[in-house]
Image (cartoon, grey):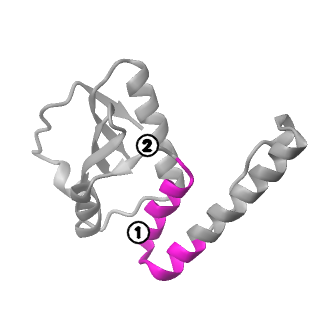
Amino acid sequence: MVQPIQLDTSVLKPADQVQAQAQRQIIQEQALRAAQTAQPFEATFQTAVDRGLGIKFSAHAKERLQSRQIELTEGDLNRIQGAVAKAAAKGARSSLLVMKDVALIVSVTNRTVITAVDGSSLKDNVFTNIDSAVIV
């Protein structure tokens, strides 16, 4: 499902408002095409990329999310982005993000999700090579 993108255009000049509207329309069209041609998982991530959230998912992370049937909503992606921004502000380089019943290892420096673990796999799991943890 493609949802409209909300921008605060009250601070933009008329020419910028037109450009912002055109960009919004292009992004929505790309997201719609992605949703029609790709499976829902890929469409969600393509929408995030199109929106410029700045969060990337490694091939390994995408594979883990699919194989473990972890579905992330647009709201989840926004929370991940916020958590990565907070970790970056504190100087973190590699962080464990815990959100609902999902754990994500994120390279804060590259803004890339490295892997994902679902709730049933969290028990008895040891996370190494991280310098921070964020509870989302």
Quadrant for residue 130, please give it.
Answer: top left
**Residue at 17% over, 55% down:** 121
For the residues labelled 1 and 2, say whether their Cβ atoms are less than 8 Å apart. no
Please state the extent of the stretch shown in magenta in the rendering. 32-52
**Residue at 57% over, 68% down:** 31
Kindly give the residue lying farthest to the front in the view shown. 15
**Residue at 33% over, 39% down:** 97
Say above or below: 66 vs 89.
below
Could you tell whether 118 is left or right of 44 in the image? Answer: left
Looking at this view, is 72 or 21 the one in front?
21
The amino acid type, in three-letter code, at marker 2 is Ile
The amino acid type, in three-letter code, at marker 1 is Glu
Q: Is residue 113 visible?
A: yes
> Which part of the image, by quadrant, shows the C terminus?
top left
Rounded to the nearest whole Å, what is the CA distance between mark 1 and mark 2?
Answer: 17 Å
Please state the horizontal and vertical placement of residue 58, each as a whole percent of the image.
Answer: 27, 53
Please state the horizontal and vertical placement of residue 24, each as a whole percent of the image.
Answer: 70, 57
> Which part of the image, by quadrant, shows the N terminus?
bottom right
Query: Pointer 2: residues within 10 angstroms few (<14), some, or many (20+)?
Result: many
Tag 2 residue: 80
Say above or below: 111 vs 4.
above
Tag 1 residue: 42
Please state the horizontal and vertical placement of residue 114, each as a whole percent of the image.
Answer: 25, 47
Query: Pointer 1: residues within 10 angstroms few (<14), some, or many (20+)?
Result: some
Main SS, magenta region, reads: helix
